[in-house]
């Protein structure tokens, strides 16, 4: 991109790949004449690291909040007991994110006929339902810390050298503000938190498609045996979760020396940030698959009704994704619901009913 601004390199104009200068001419522009420090600004990887990390943090935050919503649907669909979200229980832990997730789940399941009917259906549920406040809360703490560090970086100067004209010396200070270790470590931590959210979401999905746990028709299809239902959807969530586990190896711990050993240690933060961005997108799919299965399960549990928030979400999803009666290609369904996750639409629908939810 920097080369094209200078009239060099190559760029696409329509269907033509042109030399940079010609591409600029086609759009009525001239090559840029760079001023002091502008060349460094265009090529310095520090800014790319921070920019990608900003996008990753935003997407991960939306997906994490939507994961709470997905869990609230699943606990109703799986006849789980909401006693696990009792405020008195979570007062015994000093983690505010845990208490906030529990509160969100109470609000999202409030006035649910399903939750009332099955309040004591089991003494306790599996951890994928019972430990949602603890697991989601722990992941959210990490994501919040990452956002805090990334905001600090946004308000920082990442140049080397730093030109300091004030004072008597007018010095160019050589240092290492260009290092992105702060953001790299946080990006790696985001991938870990994202993977935790994905692994517990996938387990809830598995419980819903498994008739031994769900007490619903196998793979959530009204005619199992003749139809595979959401069997392969769970495969997809499982595959994405395994990909995320592979991505959770920290990039910032790795090192390859460059620049004739002048840069003998490098942050590797670009890879860390890029992994976080890609991981957040994968989490969007995993959460969307859980929502897709949970809404189908709620349809199968009629006439018992879910909470008002769950019903609003079910109605919104059914605008584009119809109830499954016979097998069909589910790709478009997954894409529709994933868009609702990533765009924040599912959050908006839920918050229209219960008010703002914790991020």
Image (cartoon, rainbow, N blue to C red):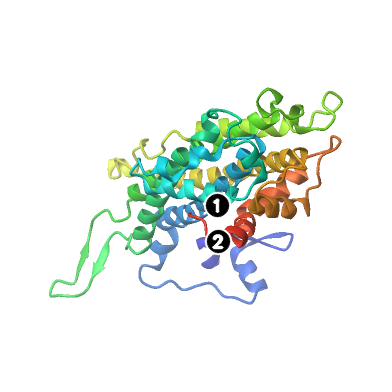
Q: Position of residue 189 (x, y in %)?
A: 41, 42
Image-based side of 267 in relation to 65, left or right: left
Above or below residue 63? Residue 162 is below
Q: Is residue 187 visible?
A: no
Q: Can you give x and y, in whole percent of width and height, for residue 307 in the image? A: 65, 49
Q: Nearer the viewer, residue 284 or 9?
A: 284
Measuring from the top left, give residue 99's x and y in whole percent: 42, 47
**Residue 43 falls in image quadrant:** bottom left
Give the x, y percent position of residue 123.
54, 28
Which is nearer the N-term, disc 1 or disc 2? 1
Q: Which mark is residue 107?
A: 1
Image point (65%, 73%), residue name: 27
Above or below, 37 against 202 in this view is below
Q: CA distance from mark 1 to mark 2?
A: 9 Å
* Residue under pointer 2: 355
Q: Quadrant of residue 188?
A: top left
* Residue drawn 50% across the image and 72% down it: 32
Q: Are marks 1 and 2 in contact (CB under 8 Å)?
A: yes
> For residue 155, what is the image quadrant?
bottom left
Residue 48 against residue 141 in the figure, above or below: below
Task: Tell me the tag on residue 324.
Answer: none
Of tags 1 and 2, which is closer to the observer? 1
Depth check, front residue: 177 or 233: 233
């Amino acid at each position: 991109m920097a080369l094209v601004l200078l009239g060099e390199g190559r760029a696409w104009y329509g269907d033509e790949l042109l030399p940079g200068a010609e591409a600029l001419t086609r759009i009525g522009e001239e090559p840029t004449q760079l001023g002091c420090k502008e060349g460094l600004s265009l090529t310095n990887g520090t800014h790319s690291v921070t920019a990608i990390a900003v996008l990753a943090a935003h997407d991960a935050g939306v997906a994490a909040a939507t994961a709470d919503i997905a869990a609230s649907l699943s606990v109703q669909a799986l006849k789980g007991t909401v006693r696990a979200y009792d405020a008195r229980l979570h007062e015994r832990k000093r983690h505010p994110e845990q208490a906030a997730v529990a509160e969100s789940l109470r609000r999202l399941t409030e006035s649910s006929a399903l939750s009332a009917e099955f309040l004591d259906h089991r003494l306790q549920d599996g951890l994928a339902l019972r430990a949602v406040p603890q697991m989601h809360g722990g992941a959210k703490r990490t994501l919040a810390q990452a956002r805090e560090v990334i905001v600090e970086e946004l308000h920082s100067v990442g140049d080397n050298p730093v030109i300091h004209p004030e004072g008597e010396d007018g010095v160019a200070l050589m240092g290492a503000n260009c290092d992105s270790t702060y953001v790299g470590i946080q990006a790696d931590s985001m991938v870990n938190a994202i993977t935790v959210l994905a692994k517990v979401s996938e387990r809830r999905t598995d419980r819903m498609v498994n008739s031994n746990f769900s007490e619903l028709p196998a793979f959530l299809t009204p005619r199992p045996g003749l139809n595979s239902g959401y069997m392969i959807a769970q495969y997809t969530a499982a595959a994405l979760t395994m990909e995320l586990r592979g991505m959770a190896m920290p990039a910032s711990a790795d090192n390859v020396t460059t620049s004739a050993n002048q840069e003998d240690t490098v942050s590797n933060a670009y890879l860390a940030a890029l992994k976080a961005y890609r991981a957040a997108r994968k989490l969007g799919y995993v959460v969307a698959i859980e929502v897709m299965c949970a809404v189908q399960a709620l349809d199968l549990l009629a006439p018992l009704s879910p909470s008002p928030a769950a019903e609003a979400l079910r109605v919104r999803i059914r605008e584009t994704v119809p109830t499954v009666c016979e097998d069909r290609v589910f790709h478009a369904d997954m894409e529709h619901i994933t868009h609702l996750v990533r765009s924040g639409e599912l959050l908006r629908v839920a918050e229209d009913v219960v008010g703002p939810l914790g991020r």
